[in-house]
Amino acid sequence: MSIKQFNGEWVAREDRVRFRFNTSEGEDYSFWLTRRILQGLIAGAQHTAVKTLEKTHAPEVAQAVQAFQQQAVAQQANFQQNYQGAAQHPLGEEPLLVIGLVIHQQDEQTSVEFQLSIGQSVHIQMAQHVVQVMVTLLNKLQETAQWGVGLPDVTPMPVLGASATPPVVH
């Protein structure tokens, strides 16, 4: 299953995120994500990305590279494009509650299994860039919900130029 587009909204009356995606195969999936599940999805995606980078970098460097890549994706993400629902709804049109997650890294692909309250699971595989777009969307949604479970704030380090006055230490 190849992801074509993501969509999400925080629904205040449910205090949940409605997360949707459609596929290049013309299928549309809709889920309810609780605060706990959304937190696990963001943290799990970040963890697998760092572990993959640790194969070629020191752990501290892998963490920094991953944070830089995520920040770059967040700056380039397009949240203005309208979501185009697909014609097929294999699990129905109503959102299903996600009660568990399993996230694995397989080579360059991240595999996510959404375990549903109806006893079924949906498996998707995504390239790292697609995972980062998904995490960016989910982070934006959790900020709207004010859940405080998203990505850590990354503040760019100030660059001291030649004309900058060095700090004074007393």
Image (cartoon, rainbow, N blue to C red):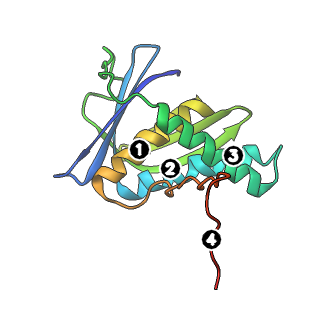
Return the residue at label 3: 65
Please give the name of the residue rendered at 46% of the width and 13% of the height, measured from the top-left corner. 25
Q: Amino acid at mark 1?
A: Leu
Q: Amino acid at mark 3?
A: Val
Please give the name of the residue rendered at 82% of the width and 45% of the height, measured from the top-left corner. 55
Marks 2 and 1: in contact by CB < 8 Å? yes
How far from the left and from the top, in percent, is residue 21? 39, 28
Q: Nearer the viewer, residue 11 or 146?
A: 146
Q: Nearer the viewer, residue 139 or 110?
A: 139
Query: Relative to 114, is 11 on the left or the right?
Result: left
Return the residue at label 2: 42
Marks 3 and 4: in contact by CB < 8 Å? no
- The answer to whether residue 149 is above or below residue 25 is below
Q: Mark 3 vs mark 2: which is more N-terminal?
A: 2
- The answer to whether residue 17 is above or below residue 158 is above
Quadrant of residue 52 within the rendered picture:
top right
Return the residue at label 1: 138
Q: Residues within 10 Å of mark 1 (few under 14, many from 20)?
A: many
Q: Amino acid at mark 4?
A: Pro
Number of numbered discs visible in the structure rendering = 4
